């Protein structure tokens, strides 16, 4: 299948076959996953007969063209090799093809990486189930809408199947989209053997060595398990296991109350489990804006079957065996004294993720990782042990640790491709949104209020905060989901958006108006004139921008301030 | 003072948790949008600026004026603080009369929402010794819903803080003490010391009147396991998160509950069982928890909310906690006491039924199915007997006839439901029944398969019981108790004796909706159906 569908992109003169595809607009910038839909459509169109044709057209590894930026004397197998076919690598590969680069992607496991196979994607399937369960179980909510539902139940196998099917569907979409565009998928673990040279191969097979003008490391991360915790994959598990939903324990302890922990608490409590959070910091949900996390705690934690221990480490976790439950030793984070022992049915370790960079051969090019992360500059260029840039080597995504989000990795990959094709580009990480898909959702972009205040003091400007409630939004009230808050942190002098935080119905979908504004440098005094359909949830942000008090006048050139009526 | 409170608190509330004005919001909102829209069309910027300025004060004014008129609306519980505030105040009025001489006043934990039972002190805005004037914010309290500034009702000096930052107090408990003049500070402090005094047993709450309002909560609401009152064994109490929440909610002393969950842990069901048995949990409530801490010995039967104070069991007896099913039965049985029931008995001749049974038995039809079918057919003609009374004010006529049949299973009792028993034929009904019983044995009944009944059938005839009396399950209108069918000598109108099989059925019904004549007519129909049993196969 792989060989039949792989097109050679060696030449810039397209074959007739190819011309059809190359005209296809790939213009979704920072959204790797959205392209799958595009990928499928190509596949559908290119099937029936054309596959055969393309077999004939396939040419064996001819030298890559030098591209249009500079002319190095050497010739390479590829313009670009990406090690790791997760969302980051996929996003980079698609953009590279769009830019006319001959691209290969090396994957040692399954295409799609963590996000698609063990992360965002299957967890969304579980959260879709938990959201509906929650609604059906909320008698009060149903009654308020005038609905009557007899007791809701679920079939664990069915739920797990949905998550698994979704992952494999997205995985094949991703694979097909790359194959259809002519990205070579090379199977095996990739290792850097020297400058611009990578070997790959499966264990027990001879390695192949390929060369490329530029190389992107996109190897991602694995769940981080602190020492003292014994993961058996059954009763003491990581998100990798939990997403398979092999069992729904009566009582599960979740170590870590970040995104992953929170989302799983949403899933497990909806399916009937009770949850105990173990958080090393003094507050639950560290990393969120404090006001948002406080509100979120009131809605997502306190009324649910959840309790928590904060300021403690889970120093020892023993899986259930010999007729004993899972035993968790809690140690005070400050005094390091033993504080408590918990006996639960299962424990989920959601303490974060560790970069997966072992065996990459970084020593061959004199690069030393920092706690496993590959050091990079703001252009994702890898920095070696002496602090010098390694030419033609980049690292994106979780492996560099800048921002461990799938879409951030993809954006970084696109940024790298822009650079290697001759346009300097620096990704503004403050414009990358993040979301936690609880019910209701939490989303954010930019700085939190304390971060913004710190920056304001340091740089000597004023900041203001504006807030709007979902309770004032017609659509939210129609859905009977008025619980929620949107918060804007901005500079009143020039209208710059510093951060936006949303907690409420569909917050994850709402954040993009704000993140796009930050990415494009749109100021509040201008965006407040943009029109929102009524009644929609997007009016929450509309109200938010309108409630901000900016001293600067709206820019006169803004097209939307022109009269519409003739 | 009242108005002062009202006007001062509401804007803050509104600012903090924003508007709670859904009902007026749509119109308001569309009005606003109209403004925006208008501004948009007109596109003269000074003009539009004006509109904008008009719009915002208009909005906020409206909210405030509406809020006061809406404050009593039940759909907006959060605007309710005015009510709890006044409630607290009126509750405390007698106290204030007592203490008015010394001019030392307590600051109470206010109820900031209708569901708030306790509040956490986020921060004290004022510190001890600060001079306060009426209406000033003193303390920030976190409720289950929001953070709110709490203001003083009086001028004075904050003499002492009873409940510190980060600590929790029950609604109505004193959290601080206010002295009117500097001279009274010392006295106030002494009072505060006695208030905060789990440590000072010399000052037990003297008033026999509801002490809960004035008794300070222990600083930490979780009972210290190391309490020296009862020497507990070395085993650690393990309770699930929800069990702990329920225990707190129902004021159950978790240390006294026997865990029946895996590894002996206390499950939510255990707490429910413990709380469900308490005869008057609401009245005892707070007081018991607090007072048991003060080691008040004889609190008599009311103390069963805290079973630790029950008389010790007879030596040698074993305590077996209820299973979940048994707890549910227990709860339902206690609940049934609130329904006024009466009973009507009726002898039914069963010769035709017995004959039919012999005929259809080989086809897998059971007596249960026959009786359920007969009852369902009779119910179809007497819908009132199939109705129920949910609120004490109305009849709820059920569109389906779902016959629940009581079955004893593993020391428990469950009522699988034959749904639409009037519509299914005998064979389908029998098959359905078989499935339900199997599922019930395997504990796999779905909730709607045991709680959707509209009428219950209980048959003890197979044990030779000739008549009995059933308890009406909550939520249903009637239950039929069926005794054994026995050969009986009967005399007919002409005086001829004959032997006929007769069984006694006894129906218990809710007299709020089903009256004697209804039941009698229903039983007559039932009897006719059974006596012409062939109609059951139609």
Image (tube, coloured by chain):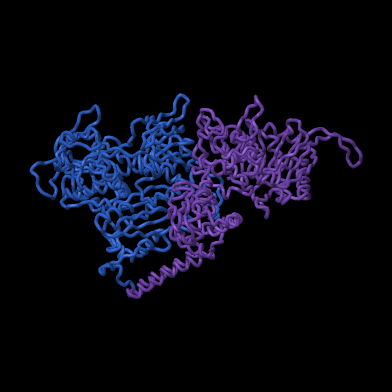
Chain colours: A blue, B purple
Q: State the residue lying farthest toward the left.
A: A73
* B15 relative to B207, above or below: below
A363 with respect to B223 (left or right): left
Whole-percent x and y of residue B470?
72, 39
| Foreground of the two, A174 or A437 | A437
Q: Is residue A342 visible?
A: yes
Whole-percent x and y of residue A396?
24, 44
Q: Residue at x 39, y 44 (%)?
A: A283
B84 with respect to B314 (left or right): left
**Which quadrant of the view contains residue A144?**
bottom right
Quarter occupied by the C terminus of chain A: bottom left
Whole-percent x and y of residue A295?
42, 51
Whole-percent x and y of residue B123?
43, 51
| Foreground of the two, A301 or B95 | B95
**Which quadrant of the view contains residue A532?**
bottom left
Quarter occupied by the N terminus of chain A: top left
Q: State the residue lying farthest toward the front.
A: B183
Q: Residue at x 46, y 41 (%)?
A: A307
A242 with respect to A143 (left or right): left
Q: Is residue A475 visible?
A: no
Q: How many marks?
A: 0
B342 with respect to B316 (left or right): right
| Foreground of the two, B373 or A563 | A563
Q: State the residue lying farthest toward the right.
A: B495
* A134 relative to B255, above or below: below
């Amino acid at each position: 299948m792989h060989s039949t569908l792989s097109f050679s992109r060696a030449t810039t003169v397209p074959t007739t076959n190819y011309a059809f595809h190359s005209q296809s607009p790939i213009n979704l910038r920072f959204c790797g996953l959205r392209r799958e839909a595009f990928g499928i459509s190509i596949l559908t169109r290119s099937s029936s007969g054309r596959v055969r044709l393309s077999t004939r057209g396939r040419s064996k590894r001819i030298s890559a063209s030098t591209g249009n930026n500079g002319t190095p004397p050497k010739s390479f197998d590829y313009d670009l090799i990406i090690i790791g076919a997760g969302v980051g690598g996929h996003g980079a590969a698609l953009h590279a093809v769009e830019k006319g680069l001959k691209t290969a992607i090396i994957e040692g496991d399954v295409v799609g990486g963590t996000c698609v196979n063990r992360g965002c994607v299957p967890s969304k399937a579980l959260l879709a189930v938990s959201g509906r369960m929650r609604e059906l179980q909320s008698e009060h909510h149903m009654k308020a809408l005038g609905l009557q539902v007899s007791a809701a139940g679920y079939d664990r196998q069915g739920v797990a199947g949905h998550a698994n099917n979704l992952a494999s569907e997205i995985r094949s979409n991703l694979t097909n989209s790359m194959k259809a565009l002519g990205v070579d998928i090379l199977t095996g673990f990739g290792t850097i053997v020297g400058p611009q040279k990578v070997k790959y191969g499966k264990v027990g097979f001879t390695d192949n060595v390929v060369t490329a003008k530029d190389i992107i490391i996109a190897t991602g991360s694995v769940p981080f398990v602190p020492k003292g915790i014994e993961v058996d994959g059954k009763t003491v598990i990581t998100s990798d296991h939990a997403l398979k939903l092999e069992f729904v324990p009566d009582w599960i302890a979740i170590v870590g109350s970040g995104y992953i922990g929170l989302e799983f608490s949403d899933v497990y409590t909806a399916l009937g489990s009770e949850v105990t959070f173990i958080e090393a910091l003094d507050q639950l949900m560290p990393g969120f804006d404090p006001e948002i996390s406080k509100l979120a705690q009131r809605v997502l934690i306190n009324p649910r079957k959840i309790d928590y221990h904060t300021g403690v480490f889970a120093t020892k976790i023993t899986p259930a065996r010999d007729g004993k439950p899972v035993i968790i030793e809690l140690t005070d984070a400050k005094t390091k004294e033993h504080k408590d022992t918990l006996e639960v049915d299962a424990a989920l370790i959601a303490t974060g993720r560790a970069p997966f960079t072992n065996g990459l051969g970084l020593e061959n090019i004199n690069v030393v990782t920092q706690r496993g992360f590959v050091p990079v500059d703001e252009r994702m260029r890898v920095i070696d042990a002496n602090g010098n840039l390694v030419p033609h080597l980049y690292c994106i995504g979780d492996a560099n640790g800048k921002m461990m989000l799938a879409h951030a990795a993809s954006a970084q990959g696109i940024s790298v491709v822009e650079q290697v094709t001759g346009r300097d580009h620096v990704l503004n990480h403050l414009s990358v949104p993040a979301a936690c898909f609880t019910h209701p959702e939490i989303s954010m972009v930019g700085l939190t209020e304390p971060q913004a205040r710190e920056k304001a003091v340091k740089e000597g400007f004023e900041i203001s905060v504006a807030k709007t409630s979902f309770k004032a939004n017609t659509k939210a009230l129609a859905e009977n989901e008025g619980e929620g808050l949107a918060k804007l942190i901005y500079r009143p002098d020039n209208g710059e958006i510093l951060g936006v935080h949303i907690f409420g119905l569909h917050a994850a979908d709402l954040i993009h108006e704000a993140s796009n504004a930050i990415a494009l440098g749109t100021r509040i005094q201008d965006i407040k004139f943009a029109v929102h359909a009524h009644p929609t949830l997007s009016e929450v942000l509309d109200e938010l921008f309108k409630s901000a008090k900016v001293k600067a006048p709206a820019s006169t050139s803004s097209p939307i301030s022109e009269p519409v009526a003739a | 003072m009242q108005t002062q409170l009202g006007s001062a608190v509401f804007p803050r509330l509104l600012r903090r948790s924003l508007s709670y004005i859904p009902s007026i919001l749509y119109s308001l909102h569309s009005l606003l949008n109209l403004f925006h829209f208008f501004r948009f069309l007109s596109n003269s910027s000074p003009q539009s600026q004006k509109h904008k300025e008009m719009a915002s004060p208009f909005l906020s004014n409206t909210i405030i004026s509406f809020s006061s008129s809406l404050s009593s609306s039940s759909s907006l519980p959060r605007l309710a603080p005015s009510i709890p505030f006044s409630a607290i105040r009126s509750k405390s009025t007698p106290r204030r009369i007592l203490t008015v001489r010394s001019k030392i006043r307590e600051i109470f934990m206010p109820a900031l929402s209708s569901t708030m039972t306790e509040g956490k002190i986020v921060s004290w805005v004022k510190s001890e010794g600060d001079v306060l004037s009426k209406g000033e914010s003193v303390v920030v309290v976190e409720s289950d819903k929001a953070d709110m500034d709490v203001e003083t009702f009086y001028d004075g000096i904050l003499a002492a803080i009873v409940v510190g930052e980060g600590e929790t107090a029950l609604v109505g408990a004193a959290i601080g003490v206010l002295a009117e003049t500097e001279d009274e500070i010392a006295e106030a402090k002494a009072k505060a010391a006695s208030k905060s005094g789990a440590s000072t047993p010399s000052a037990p709450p003297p008033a026999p009147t509801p002490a809960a309002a004035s008794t300070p909560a222990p600083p930490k609401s979780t009972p210290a396991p190391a309490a020296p009152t009862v020497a507990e064994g070395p085993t650690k109490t393990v309770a699930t998160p929800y069990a702990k929440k329920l225990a707190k909610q129902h004021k159950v002393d978790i240390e006294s509950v026997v865990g029946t969950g895996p590894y002996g842990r206390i499950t939510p069901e255990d707490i429910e069982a413990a709380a469900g048995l308490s005869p008057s949990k609401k009245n005892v409530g707070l007081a018991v928890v607090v007072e048991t801490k003060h080691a008040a010995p004889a609190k008599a039967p009311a103390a069963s909310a805290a079973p630790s104070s029950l008389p010790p069991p007879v030596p040698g007896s074993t305590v077996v906690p209820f299973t979940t099913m048994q707890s549910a039965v227990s709860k339902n049985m206690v609940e049934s006491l609130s329904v006024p029931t009466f009973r009507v008995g009726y002898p039914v001749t069963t010769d035709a039924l017995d004959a039919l049974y012999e005929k259809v038995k080989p086809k897998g039809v059971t007596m249960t199915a026959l009786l359920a079918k007969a009852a369902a057919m009779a119910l179809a003609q007497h819908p009132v007997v199939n109705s129920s009374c949910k609120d004490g004010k109305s009849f709820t006529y059920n569109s389906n006839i779902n016959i629940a049949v009581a079955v004893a299973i593993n020391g428990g009792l469950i009522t699988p439901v034959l749904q639409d028993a009037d519509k299914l034929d005998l064979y389908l009904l029998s098959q359905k029944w078989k499935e339900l019983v199997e599922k019930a044995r395997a504990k796999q009944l779905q909730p709607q398969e045991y709680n959707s009944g509209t009428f219950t059938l209980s048959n003890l005839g197979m044990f030779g019981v000739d008549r009995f009396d059933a308890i009406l399950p909550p939520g249903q209108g009637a239950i039929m108790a069926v005794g054994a069918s026995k050969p009986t000598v009967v005399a007919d109108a002409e005086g001829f004796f004959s032997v006929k099989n007769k069984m006694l059925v006894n129906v218990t019904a809710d007299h709020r909706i089903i009256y004697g004549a209804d039941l009698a007519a229903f039983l007559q129909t039932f009897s006719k159906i059974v006596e012409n049993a062939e109609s059951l196969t139609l």
